[in-house]
Structure formats: structure tokens, C-alpha cells
Image (tube, rainbow, N blue to C red):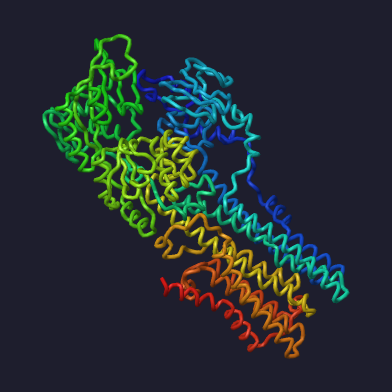
């Protein structure tokens, strides 16, 4: 298909169905335009490539310190040690670049996922694609709540209005009209333009548009550079880590000055003192903390995305482990959102629609007929699809299907009236036919039924709802050709009947509800359905047996009474989207950490206010997705629970990694400082600290990040968000671990010297014990609830690579003469190695015993 043919196909549409005859671009055309014009992206910060990553890594203070130490060794006439230090620079840089690149890959995958979605017509089929894949000439299907992905011309408009304040500053949405003829790009602003612009929001109506410009060529592209300069928000953990790093830097500088001064005064060697000070700086420098946090959060978000939950804001990842209440929509989240008409009811009686094929009794045909007429021709809504499916299968060949009728006007759903009406004209009809469907009470209101008839309908609705069906009322009216009235109430409607639609629950929901209960997380179900329908679904998914609170009842409660009622209510029915915000605020006022799901424009305030706003990725609007912190890509409740489980795992592993980093730095710092202050030979030289960092860097990031979740992760209460990560619960055990290792190392070093051994042997014994203790700290901090013997049965390939490499390199250092000379260590024998292994493990024995004691105390 040529480009002109593609444009012509947009115009080949019927007056009542703007999508009929629309073919859009072909796959080949799309591929060619992507190749020629690129992706639909604004100018932004480029992803860091390998060379840029390497440069950024080499700018880190740790590498500057290593290079400074190497320069001093050259000055001291020791080129061998200087070259070895430079080799360590390369090795540590390679490890760090690998970790950074892994983080960049995860962030790139998340950027692709988080690209705004667009609904397009290609090869005659609707497709939901990332907004960055939209090309010039694409046919966009725009609906209320969508963010426009590119500058486009409206070819069809049904009451379309757009909020263009982002570009024009106009606070009021502007009306849009369809264009005839060849479209040209213009500037935004003003009413009745036929153009919609990238980044603006459709606030009302539906439309079909042809893309004219993408990426940097759009109006939004003019301000792309300014947007690219905006830095993402920092999470609470990032701010807390930054504070800790600043404090440790102050401590490091102070101690380095003390060491340089003490060494120079006691030994008269200022160059050696400067070397000792640099060694201490390398030992204390907390360069791992920011790196570990960045890696864990990026890879954590990536892991959660593999569970079909996209993280749009980093703080939500931290909050997942603290969630105490999940407020979830019923339709599409707890249920499959695949509806079928299961029951029909009218004045003639009621009829259970069998799943197998077969004719429907004539008395119930009009319910299906007017249900179809009150729906879109090519429906997207599952309820409308259910009517269309039933009609095509059971009413084919009857006079109740009207493919040749023309849609004249639509009266949309409103907050005041939960009903939709479509006005139709038949080819030879002298009057309009109006079909309405909606909440039974709304249709009854339109029909002005008397009290007796209304009571009978309410009883039938309650019966159908108690069976777990979603119940809709159907009405009809006729109107002589004239100026159509502004409201649905101005027609003279008559009652047609009721339709009960079934929406089966998702298979994994009951198990997910049970898992939430074990994790002390309450699940609240929120729906716009009838209370009896909500109660039946709650029973089916094994939700706690509780009262049902309706939107009308909620409206009548004051804030204090509502908070009291919330303790006993888990099911909310006939709730308007605007009332979700009040529920969130009431729960938060009661001290809960709230996760709230939503999909519509009106859900945005509640999603923004919730601690964890979760938008629907499949059926949700762009407004909801932008207001939310998480996007549920498959709209499945079980994915939310999986994300919470992963969120708890990420935080557990992050805490354990930070604890390990704190613990291991204590003995390294101590053994760099104590010999200087006591006037003894140095234990650790720059080459030893560099060797240790080759173990610490991958251990604190790769090993701990890959650690599997604790089997009991969903059998404990949510984490208190008010408790800081670097509080007493983390600092005290970590520092005690480090101090116990430091005491053992000091004992080994001092006793060896006391026994008359030389400096080389004392250093070899102490350094080997430190390596063993380092590995023991890794093993014991893998879990704070299970012993290291239990965690050893748990697979972690990265762990064995790190441990194996550590002991392999240590063996080379101890028994390769050239390396042993560079590291300035003596030869160790078998009994020496046994002492080192025993002493290294003893340093963490008390922490292992503490785990057992805690478990016995429950």
C-alpha cells in the first residue's frame, strides 16, 4: 500500500463507524519509516556506552587513591608494586563497569516498557504499541484519558476535547473538530482546531487521527532539551545513603590526617605516612553504598517488570515491602474481564442463557437487540463485546440486528446518570430509535417507573447479583426527527429488561488473597457493581467475610466514622472513582500504607495520593498510568502480590548487602589504623586493600542482589516505613560483626609478633584470616533469619564464583614467590592455614547463634 493509499483508507469510512474501512500502514511501511525517520522520542540523555561508563568509573575516588599509591611506589623505587596496583585498577574497573553496564541494560529495558502506549490501526488491525514506535502516517485511535503520542490531524471526532496546557498554558480543555482534505501542521491553541499535539491529554470523547510529525519534529520536541535536563526524584533510601556517605567521608578525612601525622611524627617518614593515610582512606571510603543502592533499585525494578509490574517511580519499589492495605478494583483485576451474557429478565419472566448454541426465546430478543444498539459498533468494552457476541451467535438472520442503521448521536455516561444512550436512524425510518443501557436504577429512572414496578426490578436485580452477575438495565425510546434534546432524560423511555453478565475470577486470585492474609496485608475490593454482586465475588475469592459499604453510605459518613467502619469492611460497592481518594485518605489517617489500583481519568487523584498507586496497563488510561507509581501490565491481582513479594526480597537483600559492607569495613579500617597508632609494622598496604575490594565489590552487589527470597518473606508483617535502613537494627549487629572480626585479627597479629615471628609471617597470617573472615561475613549476611548452613543449600552461582576466585587468588599470593614478595608476606604451613580458617569463622559464630536464639523465641 502506498502512502497516498494509506491516507485514502482513512477517508473510506461509514458515517456511524469511523473505523470501518480503515486499514492504516502496513508492517513494511512502518519498518521503512522507522529506519528512515527513527523512533518517536524526544531529545534526551543518551544511554551511557561502554567507553563513557569506563571514564565515569575511573573518576571514582577509589581509583584516584589507587593511582596515587602507585605514583608513590614509583617515587619509592618500587615499580613492581606500582604496576601491580595499576593492574588492580584495571581489574576493579572491569568489575565495576560490568555492574554499571548490567544496571544500564536494566534501565534501558524499563525505559522501553515505560514508554507511553498508543492504540493504532495497522494492516487493518488494532494494535497497542509503545508510543516510541509510532511513525508518521500511523492511524491513532484516541479516547478519553489518552496521552497523544505524536502531532496528528483528526480525521474523525466524537465530542473530542484536549488539555493543551502543557504547550499553551490554557487551563481549560479546547474543543477539537475533524478535518476534511489535506492536513497541514499548525501551532496549538484555540477552539475547533483539527490538530492534536504530542504530550497533550484527551479529556473527552473519541477520535481517529493521522500522525503528521513525531519525536523532535513535534511541538513537544521544541522543549525536549529542557525536559531532558530534568533529574529524576531521589528516594528516601537514596537520601539516607547520601547522608551516611557524607558522614563517613568526614570520618575518613579526619582519621587519614591523624594517621599521616602520627606516622610522620613517630617514624620521621612523611612519604610512608602519606602512603599509610591513603591506605586508610581506601579502607574507609564508602564508595560501595551508592553503587549498591543504584544496582539494587535498578535491577529490582527490572525483576519486578518481569512479573508484569512496571516501576515508574523508585520510591514505590521501597514502599512495596511496607504495604499494609491493597485496595483493588474487581473487574479485570480480580476477574478476567471476559464477560458473557448469562441471564436475561423482562416482564415475561427470566431466562438462563445456556453456554451452548441455541435460539433465545422471542420474548428476550429485544433485550439483546437494544443492548447491542446501546454499544459501539466495534466495541472495546468487555460488556459491549458480550452483547455483540450473543447477538451474532443467537440472533443471526432475525430482524433484531441492524448493521445498516446510522448512528446519529451518543449520550455518554456521566457522574449524575450511570447510563449510555445511542440515537439511531434506519435507512427508511421516519423517526429516531434510542437505545439505552446502564445501571438498573439509572435506566429505571429514565423510564419513570412507578414504585411497584421499581420494587419488582430491584428484587430481580438482587437475585441476579447474588449469583455473582453484573446486572445492566436496557431501555428504548422513539423520537420524531427534530433538534435532539441535550439530555437523555428528555426522551420518553420504556423499560425493556435486565441482562446479567458473568465475569469469571482469575484462577490465581484465591491463593494470592491467602498469601496476603499470611503477610498481614488486608485486601479491600472496590467495585461499581451491585452490593450483592460484590458480596458473591468476595465469597468466591475467599475474601474475609465482612460488611459491604456502598458509595451512598460512604458519602453519608463523616471522617471519624468512616475510619471506624473501615476496620470491619473489606468490600465496597457502587463506589464512584472520586470516592477512592477519600478511602485512601481515611486509611492513611488510620496509619495504613495504602496501595490503590485504578484505570480511569477520575482514578488519578487516588492513585497520586496512595503510597503505592497502581495503574492498569491493559485497560487503563494514560492519565492513570502517569499518576501511578506502578503499572500493572497484565491487570492481574496475582502480579501485584508477586511484586510485593519481590519488593520484600529486594529490601531484604539490600539490607543484608549494606550490613556486609559496614561489617567488612570495620576490620579493614581497624587493621589500617591500629598498627600506626601502636608503632607496629603495617598490616595492610594499598595492594592488600585493592585485593580486598576485588572481593567486596562483586560480593555486595552481584552476590547479594542475586540472593533468592527468604521462604518466610510473605509470612511476616510489612516493614515499618518509619524505621530507617541505617538505624540501630542494622548498625549495631553490623558493627558488632566487624568489631568481633577486628578483635580476632588484632589477636592473631599481636600474638604472632609476641611469639617472635617476623613482620612478613604476621602479615600473612593476619591477611589470610581477614580473607576467610570476609567470606564468612558474606555467608552469614546472606540471611539474618537462617543460619549459613541452611543458606548454603540455596543456589547462588555468583556466590561460588566470588568465593572460589577469592581463595584461588589468595593461594597465588601465598605460594607464588613473585606475588608473595609484592604482597610482602611470609610462607604459611598447613597448621597456619587451619588457624586462619578457624579464627576467620569464629568471628561470626555469635551472630549465627543469635539467629538460632531468635528463632526459638519466635
Task: Decide if residue 807 is in sight here.
Answer: no
332 with respect to 284 (left or right): left
In the picture, measured across the screen, residue 29 lies left or right of residue 448, that is right
| Residue 559 placement (x, y as % from top left) | 39, 41
**Image x and y of residue 90, in percent:** 72, 62
Q: Pick out the residue farthest to the bottom.
A: 755
The residue lying furthest to the left in this view is: 348
Identified at 59% across, 32% down, the residue is 215
Query: Quadrant location of the C terminus?
Result: bottom left
**Numbered marks: total:** 0
Residue at 66% x, 67% y: name it.
694
Image quarter of residue 369: top left
Q: Residue at x 56, y 19 (%)?
A: 184
Q: Quadrant of residue 805?
A: bottom right
Residue at x 45%, y 41% (from the top left corner) = 607
Is 763 in front, or is 134? 763
Instruction: From this view, report whether residue 297 is shown above or below residue 171.
Output: below
Work out whether 183 lies above or below 149.
Answer: above
Where 496 falls versus 589 (above or below)?
A: above
- Asked whether, in this view, residue 51 is left or right of residue 480, the answer is right
Res. 699 image quadrant: bottom right
Residue 294 spot, x, y in % from top left = 60, 54
Q: Is 593 drawn above or below residue 385 in the view shown?
A: below
Camera sees residue 41: yes
Left or right, 50 with respect to 339, comes to right
Of residues 423 and 747, the one nearer the viewer is 747
x and y percent of residue 841 in the render?
57, 79
Amino acid at each position: 500500500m502506498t502512502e497516498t493509499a494509506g491516507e485514502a483508507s482513512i477517508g473510506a469510512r461509514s458515517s456511524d463507524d469511523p473505523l470501518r474501512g480503515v486499514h492504516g500502514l502496513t508492517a513494511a511501511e512502518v519498518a521503512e519509516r522507522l529506519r528512515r525517520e527513527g523512533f518517536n522520542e524526544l531529545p534526551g540523555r543518551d544511554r551511557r556506552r561502554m567507553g563513557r561508563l569506563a571514564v565515569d568509573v575511573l573518576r571514582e575516588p577509589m581509583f584516584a587513591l589507587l593511582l596515587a599509591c602507585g605514583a608513590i611506589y614509583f617515587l619509592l623505587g618500587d615499580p613492581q608494586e606500582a604496576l601491580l596496583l595499576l593492574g588492580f585498577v584495571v581489574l576493579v574497573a572491569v568489575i565495576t563497569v560490568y555492574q554499571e553496564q548490567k544496571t544500564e541494560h536494566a534501565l534501558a529495558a524499563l525505559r522501553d516498557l515505560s514508554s507511553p502506549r498508543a492504540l493504532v490501526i495497522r494492516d487493518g488491525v488494532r494494535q497497542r504499541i509503545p508510543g516510541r514506535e509510532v511513525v508518521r502516517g500511523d492511524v491513532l485511535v484516541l479516547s478519553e484519558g489518552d496521552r497523544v503520542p505524536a502531532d496528528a490531524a483528526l480525521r474523525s471526532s466524537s465530542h473530542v476535547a484536549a488539555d493543551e496546557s502543557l504547550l499553551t498554558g490554557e487551563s481549560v480543555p479546547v474543543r477539537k473538530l475533524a478535518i476534511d482534505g489535506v492536513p497541514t501542521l499548525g501551532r496549538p491553541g484555540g477552539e475547533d482546531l483539527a490538530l492534536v499535539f504530542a504530550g497533550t491529554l484527551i479529556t473527552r470523547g473519541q477520535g481517529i487521527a493521522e500522525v503528521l510529525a513525531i519525536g523532535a519534529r513535534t511541538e513537544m520536541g521544541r522543549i525536549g532539551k529542557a525536559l531532558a535536563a530534568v533529574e529524576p526524584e531521589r528516594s528516601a533510601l537514596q537520601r539516607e545513603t547520601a547522608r551516611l556517605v557524607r558522614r563517613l567521608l568526614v570520618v575518613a578525612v579526619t582519621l587519614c590526617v591523624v594517621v599521616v601525622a602520627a606516622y610522620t611524627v613517630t617514624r620521621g617518614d612523611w612519604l610512608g605516612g602519606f602512603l599509610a593515610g591513603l591506605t586508610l582512606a581506601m579502607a574507609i571510603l564508602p564508595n560501595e553504598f551508592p553503587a549498591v543502592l543504584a544496582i539494587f533499585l535498578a535491577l529490582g525494578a527490572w525483576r519486578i517488570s518481569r512479573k508484569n509490574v512496571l516501576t515508574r517511580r523508585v520510591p514505590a519499589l521501597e514502599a512495596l515491602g511496607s504495604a499494609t492495605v491493597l485496595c483493588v478494583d474487581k473487574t479485570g483485576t480480580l476477574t478476567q474481564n471476559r464477560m458473557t451474557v448469562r441471564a436475561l429478565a423482562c416482564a415475561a419472566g427470566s431466562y438462563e442463557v445456556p453456554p451452548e448454541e441455541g435460539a433465545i426465546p422471542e420474548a428476550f430478543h429485544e433485550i439483546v437487540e437494544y443492548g447491542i444498539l446501546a454499544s459501539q459498533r466495534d466495541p472495546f468494552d468487555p460488556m459491549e463485546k458480550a452483547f455483540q457476541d450473543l447477538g451474532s451467535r443467537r440472533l443471526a438472520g432475525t430482524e433484531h440486528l441492524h448493521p445498516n442503521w446510522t448512528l446519529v448521536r451518543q449520550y455518554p455516561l456521566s457522574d449524575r446518570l450511570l447510563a449510555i444512550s445511542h440515537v439511531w436512524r434506519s435507512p427508511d425510518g421516519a423517526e429516531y430509535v434510542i437505545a439505552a443501557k446502564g445501571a438498573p436504577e439509572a435506566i429505571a429512572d429514565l423510564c419513570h417507573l412507578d414504585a411497584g414496578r421499581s420494587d419488582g426490578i430491584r428484587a430481580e436485580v438482587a437475585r441476579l447479583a447474588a449469583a455473582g452477575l453484573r446486572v445492566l438495565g436496557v431501555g428504548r425510546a422513539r423520537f420524531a426527527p427534530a433538534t435532539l434534546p441535550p439530555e437523555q432524560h428528555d426522551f420518553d423511555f420504556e423499560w425493556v429488561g435486565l441482562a446479567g453478565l458473568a465475569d469469571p475470577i482469575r484462577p490465581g486470585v484465591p491463593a494470592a488473597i491467602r498469601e496476603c492474609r499470611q503477610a498481614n496485608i488486608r485486601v479491600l475490593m472496590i467495585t461499581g457493581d451491585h452490593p450483592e454482586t460484590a458480596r458473591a465475588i468476595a465469597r468466591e475469592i475467599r475474601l474475609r467475610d465482612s460488611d459491604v459499604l456502598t458509595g451512598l453510605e460512604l458519602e453519608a459518613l463523616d471522617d471519624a466514622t468512616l475510619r471506624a467502619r473501615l476496620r470491619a469492611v473489606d468490600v465496597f460497592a457502587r463506589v464512584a472513582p472520586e470516592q477512592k481518594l477519600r478511602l485512601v485518605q481515611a486509611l492513611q489517617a488510620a496509619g495504613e500504607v495504602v496501595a490503590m489500583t485504578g484505570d480511569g481519568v477520575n482514578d488519578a487523584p487516588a492513585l497520586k495520593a496512595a503510597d503505592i498507586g497502581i495503574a492498569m496497563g491493559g485497560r487503563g488510561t494514560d492519565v492513570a498510568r502517569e499518576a501511578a507509581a506502578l503499572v500493572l501490565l497484565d491487570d492481574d491481582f496475582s502480579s501485584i502480590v508477586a511484586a510485593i513479594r519481590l519488593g520484600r526480597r529486594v529490601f531484604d537483600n539490600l539490607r543484608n548487602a549494606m550490613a556486609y559492607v559496614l561489617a567488612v569495613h570495620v576490620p579493614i579500617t581497624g587493621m589500617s589504623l591500629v598498627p600506626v597508632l601502636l608503632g607496629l609494622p603495617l598490616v595492610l598496604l594499598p595492594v592488600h586493600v585493592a585485593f580486598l575490594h576485588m572481593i567486596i565489590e562483586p560480593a555486595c552487589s552481584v552476590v547479594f542482589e542475586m540472593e533468592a527470597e527468604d521462604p518466610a518473606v510473605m509470612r511476616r508483617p510489612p516493614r515499618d516505613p518509619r524505621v530507617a535502613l541505617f538505624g540501630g537494627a542494622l548498625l549495631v549487629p553490623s558493627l558488632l560483626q566487624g568489631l568481633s572480626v577486628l578483635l580476632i585479627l588484632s589477636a592473631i597479629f599481636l600474638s604472632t609478633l609476641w611469639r617472635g615471628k617476623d613482620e612478613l609471617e604476621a602479615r600473612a597470617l593476619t591477611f589470610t584470616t581477614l580473607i576467610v573472615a570476609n567470606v564468612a561475613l558474606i555467608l552469614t549476611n546472606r540471611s539474618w533469619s537462617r543460619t549459613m548452613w541452611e543458606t548454603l543449600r540455596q543456589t547462588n552461582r555468583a556466590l561460588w564464583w566470588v568465593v572460589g576466585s577469592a581463595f584461588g587468588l589468595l593461594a597465588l599470593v601465598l605460594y607464588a614467590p613473585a606475588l608473595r614478595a609484592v604482597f610482602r608476606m611470609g610462607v604459611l604451613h598447613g597448621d597456619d592455614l587451619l588457624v586462619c580458617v578457624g579464627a576467620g569463622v569464629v568471628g561470626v559464630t555469635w551472630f549465627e547463634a543469635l539467629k538460632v536464639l531468635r528463632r526459638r523465641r519466635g
